[in-house]
Image (cartoon, rainbow, N blue to C red):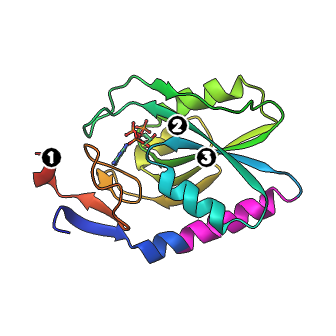
Amino acid sequence: MNDLSEVLYTSDELARRVGEVAAQIDADYEGREVLLVGVLNGAVMVMSDLQRAMKSHVQMDWMAVSSYGSGTQSSGVVRILKDLSMDLEGRHVIVVEDIIDTGLTLSYLMSNLASRKPASLEIMTMFRKPEAARMDVAVKYVGFEIPSQFVVGYGLDYAGRYRNLRDLGILAPHIYA
Ligand SMILES: O=P(O)(O)OC[C@H]1O[C@H](OP(=O)(O)OP(=O)(O)O)[C@H](O)[C@@H]1O
Ligand SMILES: Nc1nc2[nH]cnc2c(=O)[nH]1
């Protein structure tokens, strides 16, 4: 697709890495049932692939938050659009994100979720940009560290499009210029 200036990871590379992370989570949580909390909409692909790659029992719930509107810049304001259905108290929770960019969404989410008294609370993100490495929230599982460019595919959109691309790529600047 010529809307991408570069493919960073092919669908095969993404699947392989998700399998590795799933195996690590299975091992880390042996004997404990995990609740994966997916952050809509971007995390739909990684949530779906991660769960199917895991061998342990796993439950899922979803939250929707938004800080990007329809563009490529964070608005700086995180809004909860849909809250969880489940009570987190006493559960082993892993928040699943597609990407951590500025870290703003996750910093907000982690303090919000921690106040619900889960037994444990960790983060899995498929992609992380360098800016987020400065976050004071520890991220236990990272799929890939990626450059500071606007990426699409594998759940990530620009103006609602490109989420269904199977690869992850850098959006060509002429698309949003
Ligand atoms: O680290 P940050 O700079 O806060 O960015 C990360 C957030 O941005 C994206 O969500 P977005 O608001 O675009 O919603 P979407 O998942 O529905 O596309 C992504 O899914 C993360 O939740
Ligand atoms: N599609 C997309 N959404 C984001 N949200 C935060 N960073 C990004 C990014 O690089 N691409």
Q: Is residue 87 left or right of residue 81?
A: right
For mark 1, give the secondary structure.
helix
Looking at the rendering, which quadrant does residue 16 occupy?
Answer: bottom right
* 122 w.r.t. 107: above or below: below
Q: What amino acid type should be assigned to the residue bearing mark 1?
A: Tyr
* 47 w.r.t. 117: above or below: below
Q: Is residue 1 left or right of residue 145?
A: left
Near-viewer residue (55 or 94): 55
Disc number lying in front (1 or 2): 1
| N-term-proximal mark, 1 vs 2 | 2
Q: What amino acid type should be assigned to the residue bearing mark 2?
A: Met
Residue matched to label 1 = 176
Q: x and y percent of residue 142 in the render?
A: 56, 56
Near-viewer residue (5 or 34): 34
Distance from Cα at disc 3 to Cα at disc 2: 9 Å
For mark 3, give the secondary structure.
loop
Query: Is the N terminus in the top left, top right, bottom left or bottom right quadrant?
Result: bottom left
Q: x and y percent of residue 153 in the render?
A: 35, 59
| N-term-proximal mark, 1 vs 3 | 3
Residue matched to label 2 = 135
Looking at the rendering, which quadrant does residue 52 occupy?
Answer: bottom right
Start and end of the magenta stretch? 16-30
Residue contact between numbered discs 3 and 2, judged by CB atoms under 8 Å: yes
